[in-house]
Amino acid sequence: MTQILSSRRQFLAASAALPFALRSFAQTPTEPHWVFLGTGVQGIYRAPWNAATGELGAIELAVATDRPTFIAMHPKLPLLYAANEAAKGDGAFSSFHVDATQGTLKLIQQVSSRGGAPCYVSVDSTGRSAFVADYMGGSMAAFALGPAGEITDAGGLDCQHNPACGVLGPVKDRQEEPHLHCATIAPGNDFLLVCDLGDDAIEVFPIAPGKKDLVGAPVRVQARVGSGPRHVVFHPNKRWVYCVHELDCTIDLYDWHAHGRKATLTLREGSTISTLTAGSEMAGNTGCEVLVSEDGRFIYTCTRGEDTISVYRVDATTGLLTEQQRFSCGGKIPRIIAFDPSRKWLVSCNQGGDGSVTVFAHEPKTGHLSETPKTFAAPNPMFAQWV
């Protein structure tokens, strides 16, 4: 992968206007707000966002870039980072300057993601490190971020050649090699959880943003055989972790304990629930995303194939889940579901068919979602990020 604007001198030249960008970022107008869409096509798209009505304005190209399937904002700077899934070979990790007033993006830097098909990006809460999960070949790349958000290579994990990675799972057509699917930072900003669909494992890395040794050796946590862990989310109490499994369409509850540079993640026996409609066959269905409400009382998930969204009530004492609601996502193949900043709306990015974004009204107090969404055509949408 050819590196674009990869040297420090080039980066500083490209970001000379950053102080002015910071000022404009801090003065983001009340209206319009923008939503950026990561896609499986050649660009990040944008649309004006109306938080009062849950409606998107005209969806149009914000910047051309190769298959930006997952995007994330820097916590302090007007920078957006993207995972670029290349058609072949290594993918890329890119940064873009965000003009929140105009809803525009400008490429600042691009480096190799150090693996194929990067599918997840996270930036730690201090803005000093970023992590990319590569689906093909099973690698996790860790990057130090400089004061202006510049990307510096800082290590990671290569499951193809690392004894820390385990035995491949039994689903031959999906677990033929390691497949890393997320890189989720723990609430304390001191650990990284990486789901490996191919090995049925969750790798837990100690991290130290801003330090020379950014990533420590991982501890491998065995998931259920053949489950294919995909994404995890932390409960607000910082003691429970919910994992959605792609291959068997389930959610598991794990107990989390962290102290210093050591952490344990323990599967709660008897916590497994199916995300499928009762009586549905497993074939053709895959679990996808998992969200938790701000107050921790509800869990939300989507399942591709039957193309549904489900809402679960969380038992305040045990953390166990009880289904509360289930309905169509309003499109085909929901890749991601996400709440807008107001939490009044839940958005589903549906990459199948002609592509669509569906918007459901959300009642935070009850966790209830409207079952008839507003629908907007969009090119192969895979992620939504509000600015």
Image (spheres, rainbow, N blue to C red):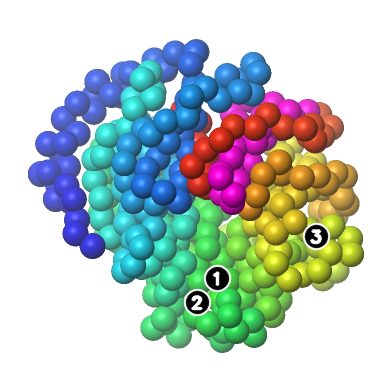
* CA distance for labels 2 and 3: 25 Å
Queried whether the magenta region covers residue 209, the answer comes back as: no
N-term-proximal mark, 2 vs 3: 2
Residue type of the residue flagged with mark 3: Leu
Q: Position of residue 164 (x, y in %)?
A: 48, 81
Q: Is residue 129 visible?
A: no
Q: Are the two marked residues, 1 and 2, in contact with CB atoms closer than 8 angstroms? A: yes
What element does badge 1 sit on?
Answer: strand
Residue sitting at x 63%, y 41%: 348
Residue at left offset 42%, top offset 31%: 60
Quadrant location of the N terminus? Answer: bottom left
Give the CA separation, mark 1 to mark 2.
6 Å
What segment carries the magenta color? 338-364
Residue that label 2 marks = 178
Residue tagged 3: 276
Which numbered disc flags the more N-terminal residue, 1 or 2?
A: 2
Disc 1 residue crowd, few under 14, some 14–19, many 20+, Cα 10 Å? many
- Rendered residue at 47%/67% (across/down): 135
Give the mark toward the camera: 2 or 3. Answer: 3
Is 295 located above or below residue 115 in the figure?
above
Q: CA distance from mark 3 to mark 1?
A: 22 Å
